[in-house]
Structure formats: C-alpha cells, structure tokens
Amino acid sequence: MANERQDGRRKDEATNTEFVGHEWDGIEELDTPMPRWWLWTFYATIVWGLAYTVFYPAWPMINQATAGVLEWTSRGQLAEELSAAELERADVRAQIAATPLERLPDDSVLLAQAVAGGRAAYQVNCIQCHGSGAAGSQELGYPNLSDDDWLWGGDIRAIETTLVHGIRQQGDPETRQSQMPAYEGILTNDQVGDVVDHVLSLSDLSEPNAAGADLYEQNCALCHGPGGLGDRALGAPNLADAVWLRGNSRQAVTQQILNPRMGMMPKWEGRLDPVTIQMLAAYVHSLGGGEEFVEVAADPEVEVDEQP
C-alpha cells in the first residue's frame, strides 16, 4: 500500500520510502537512498582523483602532460630500474673482462653468468641465421654450432676470434678467409664423378674410387690433406667426419666441386662491446661442441699437439 503526501508524492507504507514515479505493469520503483558507506567511498574516489591530478602527470597539454608536483614519470622510473640493473651487472661484466677468456671455465659461477649473458646476446644477434637451437641451416649454409665439427677451431678463443673478425668480412685484414676454386671446366663430368665417389668414400658413404683418389691427390689434398681431414689454418673442412655444411648427397658434393658456395659472416667488433663478445663466445662454446683450449708453447722447439 502507499500513502500520498501533500506535495503529491507517494510513499511506500512498508518501508516509508518515496516512489520515483516509474511504473510498469503494476510494478513501481522506490527511491531508495544509497548506503552511506557507498557514498563516502564515492566521495573518497573523487578526492583521490583530484589529488592524483595534482601529484602525478594527468592533464594532457599540447606537447606533454602536466608534470605533477612529484614530477614522476613512467619513463623516469624505467630509466632508474635500468640504471640499477646495469650497476648490478657491472661487477659481473668487470670480472668477465678481467678474466682471460680461456680461464672462464675455471670459475663455474662466473662461467654460468657469462653463458647467461651470451645467451641473451645470441637471441638478439645470431638467431636469425643459426636458429633458436643453433642448428644452423644446411640449405642456406649456416653452420650448426651445437655439433663438434669446427671449420676454424672450436675452443673458446677461436670462437671469439671468429666473432670479432667474422668470415670473409671485407675491410678486415684479420677476418677468417678461405676460397675453394671452381672445377667446372677444369675436370670433365666423369672426373668429377670419380672425385665425388672418393670424397664420399672418406666418410664411408660410397665405395672407393681409384681414379677419384688420384684426382683428389692432384687437386684437393693440398688443402684438405691426404686423408681428407682438412686444415683449420686454411679453413679447409674435414671431409672424413660425415658432417657436411652443404649436405652429403652426391648432388650437393658435385655442386660444391663444380661451383662452390662460400658463406659470409659479419664481424661483431664495433657492433658489440668486447665483454658481450666474450659472453657470446662462452655461450656458443657451451652448446655442446666446444673444445678445450690448448695454449701454444712460446718455445718453438716445444711441440704442442693441435686440436683434432
């Protein structure tokens, strides 16, 4: 039931609450006031909003927002956090810089930190060619960095040298450099077939070919060695380990003899700082195929075994 007031507005008898005047199918709405706690909360948010615009950047202007009394910005906070992170890493980087690269494995903690930093640098700079798992690409001629086959040497110092100077990098006199001649027009098709047989037989992928062995001795042994073990000083690959950069099919070997495909790797000196290059070398060395560093004796009369 409802009572009608003198001003014409009606109140609900049960709750003593006025009606708002809306009615639908006999159902009317009461003008129930908001809970007091809700009103105070609402007022508090208004006060908070006004205070925020005073203390923090809020009102957009033509070129920038109002700075606020505290002059706080998200960019400034990011800069502070990055600066703190750099200071935290500075000590580690200084230790890496002060440690001879080949001595890094002697300190397992420092090595782990170097590998972690190198992994981050790899993801940014090397993944595009060598892949996320460092398996490379046989089709494109990008080496697999996780196997134990190294064209220029797989100890940590040799890897660093490759990173610093690159492969066939123009303008760098210390870059790794090798060139295989094209035998198209020099050997007949039958002779090329014989050489392919012999080269594949070095990895037990074909039957031996006497004619091919003679041609190999005349044309290839100077760089690749009599047994096809290669020469890292010349960048001549090992042909007897069944690991092939461009593939071990007859077609792939034939193409490499007739018209060799020579890859290029940019040097990272000048692009990355020396410590980052050291960490990157440590990471690549840790991928599974890294070799132990062998220091060459200063006395020329003392013989030191080279890496296999």
Image (spheres, rainbow, N blue to C red):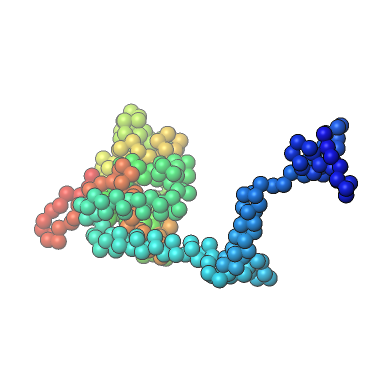
Report which quarter residue 56 is drawn in: bottom right
Q: For the point 35% across and 29% down, which residue is it? A: 206
Looking at the rendering, in which quadrant would you find the C terminus?
top left
Using the image as rendered, state which of residue 55 and residue 215 is in the foreground. Answer: 55
Using the image as rendered, state which of residue 3 and residue 59 is in the foreground. Answer: 3
Q: For the point 69% across and 47% down, which residue is it? A: 34
Any part of residue 55 in sight: yes
Q: Position of residue 72 (x, y in %)?
A: 53, 67
Q: For the point 35% across and 51% down, which residue is it? A: 116
Q: Is 204 rendered above or below residue 308? A: above
Q: Position of residue 302 (x, y in %)?
A: 11, 56
Using the image as rendered, state which of residue 158 and residue 198 is in the foreground. Answer: 158
Using the image as rendered, state which of residue 37 and residue 51 is in the foreground. Answer: 37
Q: Position of residue 114 (x, y in %)?
A: 31, 54
Give the residue at the far top of this rendering. Answer: 207
Q: For the point 63% across and 54% down, which residue is it? A: 40
Q: Position of residue 64 (x, y in %)?
A: 63, 69
Q: Is 251 rendered above or below residue 274? A: above
Taking 186 as reference, is 90 left or right? left
Q: Is 244 rendered above or below residue 292? A: above
Any part of residue 184 in sight: no
